[in-house]
Image (cartoon, rainbow, N blue to C red):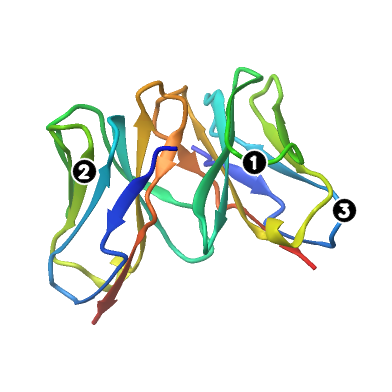
Amino acid sequence: GQQLNQSPQSMFIQEGEDVSMNCTSSSIFNTWLWYKQDPGEGPVLLIALYKAGELTSNGRLTAQFGITRKDSFLNISASIPSDVGIYFCAGHDTGFQKLVFGTGTRLLVSP
Amino acid sequence: KAGVTQTPRYLIKTRGQQVTLSCSPISGHRSVSWYQQTPGQGLQFLFEYFSETQRNKGNFPGRFSGRQFSNSRSEMNVSTLELGDSALYLCASSSGPGQPQHFGDGTRLSIL
């Protein structure tokens, strides 16, 4: 089945640093979504991308839908302690049959 | 606007029992999807319902089933529970297939 390769698996950074994570797929996706999950809670939608090449921001977060429709990245600028959590990418397959999730990037931020 | 509500939040069962989990979607959302989340397998798609019809199903055994009611609320049922069914079960709703999904906080199921 379709799989999303998400990297890095984990990151440990200092407060104030910028962060970048990405997702790649062997097949084309129609949409890319980025979620953040805190312990004991469900994933929260951060950014949704609908068109190849689209670049979208949400506060300190910026994400892009790759031109090939097989990848996406998420950048977090000027990280703060509350950015700690697990970030997931997800994509809708070409038939909009289901949402496929990446394996997650665990972010730790040191004050 | 109320978010996705899942009940119960925590559940402890023993092997062989069955369990029913409930999900109330965001008002106006007609699509509900269910996922299983475990440390080893990540987020795995179980099934999606839209307008009371199962639209798609993941690779889970027949012990896992679900349904959706006319008010878009959904339930999933797991019969003959196994130890490996211990997981966080997440429900997500959207306005329709292919639209961004919004998640509830899940039901933590533990099998003893």
Residue that mark 1 sits on = B60
Furthest residue toward right = B16
Q: Assign the N terminus of chain A to one quadrant of the image.
A: top left
Q: Is residue B26 above or below residue B96?
A: below
Q: Secondary structure at mark 2?
A: strand
Residue that mark 3 sits on = B17
Q: Is residue B100 above or below residue B70?
A: below
Give the amino acid type for the residue marked by disc 2 in the picture. Answer: Ser
Q: Is residue B45 left or right of residue B69?
A: left
Residue A72 tag number? 2
Please report the residue visible at 77 percent of the width from the left and 41 percent of the height from the top: B63
Residue B55 quadrant: top right
Please report the residue visible at 21 percent of the width from the left and 41 percent of the height from the top: A71
Residue B68 in picture, x, y percent from top left: 69, 26
Give the amino acid type for the residue marked by disc 3 in the picture. Answer: Gln
**In the rendered structure, are the residues bearing label 2 and label 3 in contact, judged by CB atoms less than 8 Å apart?**
no
Q: Does label 3 or label 1 sit earlier along the sequence?
A: 3
**In the rendered structure, are the residues bearing label 1 and label 2 in contact, judged by CB atoms less than 8 Å apart?**
no
Give the amino acid type for the residue marked by disc 1 in the picture. Answer: Phe
Q: Is residue A44 visible?
A: yes
Nearer to me, B46 or B92: B46
C-alpha separation, residue under disc 3 versus residue under disc 1:
18 Å
Residue A25 in picture, x, y percent from top left: 28, 41
Q: Secondary structure at mark 3?
A: loop
Residue B109 in picture, x, y percent from top left: 70, 59
C-alpha separation, residue under disc 2 versus residue under disc 3:
42 Å
